[in-house]
Amino acid sequence: MLRCSHAILATILFVLGVAGLVWALTFSPSFQNCHATANQDNAKKGQQSASPVGVWHIVQCEAVSLNENNGAVTAVATLAIAGFTLILWLATSQQARLTGDTIALTREALLASHRPLLVVHSVRVLDADQSKSPDDQPLRVEFSVINAGTSAGTVTGSAVYLDVLFPIDRPYLPQLPRNDRISPRPYGVGATDTITVETDRYGYGNFIGNPAKIPYLSGWIVYEDGRGHARTTYFCRQFNRFAESNIDGRFVPVDDPDCEKTY
C-alpha cells in the first residue's frame, strides 16, 4: 500500500513536471516569435479564425521552442527523472524495511508460541558391581532427557544429584549447586540424551540395607529458546519399592508440584 501511494505521487509529480515544461515553453521568446509569425501569415490569408490551423501552429511553435531550448529542457527532464527515481527508491527502501519488520514480528510470534521443553524420563537403577561389597559401592541410576517442546532449545546449565535419604532430608531444588551433568548443548525438537549418575561410595549399601531411606534423583535444567529467553525445569523423582522387595521398584515424581515444574 505504501509503495503504491509513492508510485502514484511520483506519477502525479511527473505529469505536473511535463505540464510545467509545456507551460514554460509556451511563454518562451522563441514560442512567442513563432506564434506571432503564424498569426501574421494567417492574417494575410484571411484565416485567423480557423481553429485547426491555429492548433497546428501551436504544436509547430512548441516544437520550435523545444528545439531552441533543448539544453534547458534536457536539464529539467534529467531533474524530473532523478526526482522520480528518488521517490521510487524511497518507496522501495521503506517497503523493504516494513517487510523486514513483518518478518521479525512473525518470527517473534512463532517463537513465543513454540517453546522448548526439556523433560527427564525413563529413570532406572543399574545393576550393582558383583565384584564389590554392596556396602562399599555407589548406587547408579540411568535416565534420559528429551526436548518434548515445539522448538529447539540450548541447555546452558544443569544440576543433577542422586542421593539415598530419609524423606525429611530431601534437597531444596533451587539450592542444588550446578554440576552440568546434563551437558550444555543444543537440543532440537525430539532430541534426547542418556545420562548416568551415582551416589557416594556407600549409596548402594544404604539402598538395600535401610528401607526407610529412599533414592532421590533431583535437579534442575536451564535452557534458552531461539530468542535467548531462559526457561528452568525442576525435577525430583523418588524410588518406590515394590511390595516385599528392597531393590525392585521404579522412580516416580514426588508428591510436590513445585518439584516437577517448568518456569
Image: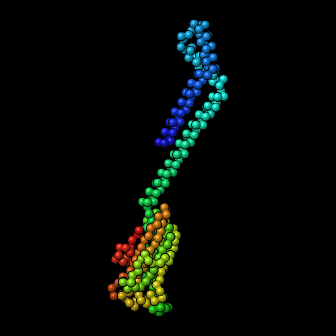
- Towards the viewer: 22 or 217: 22
Image x and y of residue 130, in percent: 48, 90
Q: Residue at x 50, y 77 (%)?
A: 179
Q: How many marks?
A: 0
Q: Residue at x 58, y 27 (%)?
A: 21
Image x and y of residue 113, in percent: 42, 60
For residue 230, say whether it is visible: yes
- Identify the colour scheme used: rainbow
In the picture, measured across the screen, residue 35 lies left or right of residue 185, that is right
- Towards the viewer: 236 or 94: 94
Image x and y of residue 80, in percent: 59, 34
Image vertical order of residue 103 relative to residue 117, above or below: above
Quadrant assignment for the C terminus: bottom left
Q: Residue at x 63, y 20 (%)?
A: 29
Image x and y of residue 71, in percent: 66, 28
For residue 214, say whether it is visible: no
- Towards the viewer: 163 or 172: 172
Q: Quadrant of residue 172?
A: bottom left
In the picture, measured across the screen, residue 41 lies left or right of residue 98, that is right
Q: Residue at x 48, y 61 (%)?
A: 227
Image vertical order of residue 52 relative to residue 143, above or below: above
